[in-house]
Amino acid sequence: MKQPWTKEEMAQKAAARLENGFCVNLGFGMPTAVAEYIPEDIDVMFHSENGILGYGPKAVEGESDYDPDLGDAGGVMVTTTPGMSIFDHPTSFAIIRGGHLDATVLGALQVSEKGDLANWKLPTKKVGSTGGAMDLAVGAKRVIAMMTHTARDGEPKILKECTYELTGKECVTTIVTDLAVIDVTEDGLVVADMASGYTLEDIQAVTGAPLKAASGLKQ
């Protein structure tokens, strides 16, 4: 039986790609859930564009550590951790542009086989929403794109070439969708993991670029 991953399972897959000691930025939407699934054996420091470094998981209203004035760039209320720091926007973007982020997890509209990222503007919209995505796409050492595998109309979101306006070129290192985890390599797109019940052929059928199976991939 084919069973796509839930948003929570996608967040777990993305979290599994982070390493001990990483400084990580989480984008708006689905990526914010990644903070809830960091493996217990690793320590990750989270960064937010609005000027927070070292915050904890999402805060729960009514709990003692809930602070309505402490939110990330996406407006999600977060918890404090020992050593957390708060600073201004220029300092926050200096961290991004200075190459001090080990990874970022960003939502995506399209990703190309070369790792081009489009996530800020739909062709049907006159105005897009960049936020810090363009800075993060080129400033972070690793870029994990997190999205559904296809659009609502069933069209592939992983393509040979993006058709939407780009956020960054050749910046995505890993794609996490509701169907698969795919690494962007010099040899093309490599499927490292798949949702239950799916085969490589199933994934290829809804992908607009050639896929390869990673060594040891279980189907």
Image (cartoon, rainbow, N blue to C red):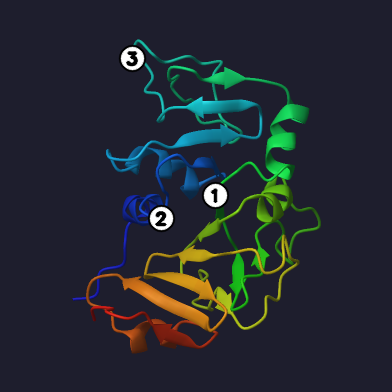
Badge 1, how many Cα within 10 Å: few under 14, some, many 20+?
many
Q: Residue beneath label 2, please?
A: 17
Q: Is residue 153 left or right of residue 110?
A: left
Q: For this rendering, which residue is in front, 22 or 135?
A: 22
Which mark sits nearer the N-terminus, 3 or 1?
3
Which element type, helix, strand or loop, lies under badge 2?
loop
Q: CA distance from mark 2 to mark 3?
A: 30 Å
Which quadrant of the figure has residue 74? top right
Measured Cα–Cα span from mark 1 to mark 2: 9 Å
Q: Secondary structure at mark 3?
A: loop
Instruction: Give the label, 3 or 1, closer to the camera.
Output: 1
Quick check: marks 1 and 2 in contact, CB under 8 Å? Answer: yes
Residue at left 57%, top 45%?
Answer: 27
- Residue 166: x and y in percent read 74, 65
Would you name the residue on which mark 1 appears?
Answer: 103
Task: Give the answer, above or below, for where 60 lies relative to 214.
Answer: above
Instruction: Determine the residue positioned at 31% across, 62% down.
Output: 5
Which label number is shown at residue 63?
3
Give above or below for 16 relative to 153: above
Tell me if residue 22 comes above or below residue 199 in the rendering.
above
